[in-house]
Image: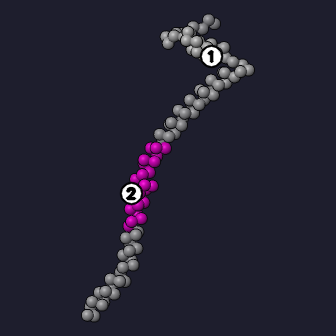
Amino acid sequence: MAHIAKLRMLLMSALGPAIAVLLLLFFAGYVVLGSNGVLAWGDYSRQLRDAKAELKIVQLHRQELRNRVDLLNPRRVDPDLSDELIRRQLGVIHHDEVVVPLN
């Protein structure tokens, strides 16, 4: 009976450290395998690289649109752009049309 009591006392005293070790292993596993863990870092860096490339494309497109808006300023309209837009609206432009500069 005394051996059982000693064994029970030993198990009860080891229960706290065992739970602490299990929690530590759980958190260590989450650091490696979790959604924000070490293994997800490579995926995040790839997503960041893709987003930066897409940002450059969008910035170039925005710059082209800003230039086009500047050319359509009512105070100083670009004659070539206005001619292109008018002909497109009237339907007198062809898809294979080539503009030849005279100067």
Q: Going by the picture, which residue comes out furthest to the right? A: 75
Q: Position of residue 96 (x, y in %)?
A: 49, 10
Q: Which residues are magenta?
A: 25-48
Task: Work out whether residue 91 or residue 96 is closer to the camera in this orientation and state it.
Answer: 91
Chief SS of the magenta region: helix
**Residue at 47% across / 39% down in the picture?**
50
Q: Position of residue 90 (x, y in %)?
A: 58, 12
Estimate how packed mark 1 is, as few (under 14), some (14 to 19) or many (20 or more) residues with alpha carbons within 10 Å: few
Q: Are marks 2 and 1 in contact (CB under 8 Å)?
A: no
Inspect the image, locate mark 1, and give the three-letter code of the amino acid beneath it.
Leu
**Residue at 27% across / 89% down in the picture?**
4
Residue receiving disc 2: 33
**Residue at 46% across / 48% down in the picture?**
44
Q: Position of residue 100 (x, y in %)?
A: 57, 7
Q: Position of residue 46 (x, y in %)?
A: 44, 44
State which mark lies toward you, 2 or 1. 1
Q: Is residue 84 visible?
A: no
User: Gap between marks 2 and 1, in whole Å?
Assistant: 56 Å
Residue 40: say if magenta: yes
Inspect the image, locate mark 2, and give the three-letter code of the amino acid beneath it.
Leu
Q: Quadrant of residue 93?
A: top right
Estimate how packed mark 2 is, as few (under 14), some (14 to 19) or many (20 or more) residues with alpha carbons within 10 Å: few
Location of the N terminus (image quadrant): bottom left
46 relative to 102, above or below: below
Residue 102: say if magenta: no
Element type where label 1 sits in the image = helix
Residue receiving disc 1: 81
Element type where label 2 sits in the image = helix
Q: Going by the picture, which residue comes out furthest to the bottom? A: 2
**Residue at 64% across / 15% down in the picture?**
82
72 relative to 87, above or below: below
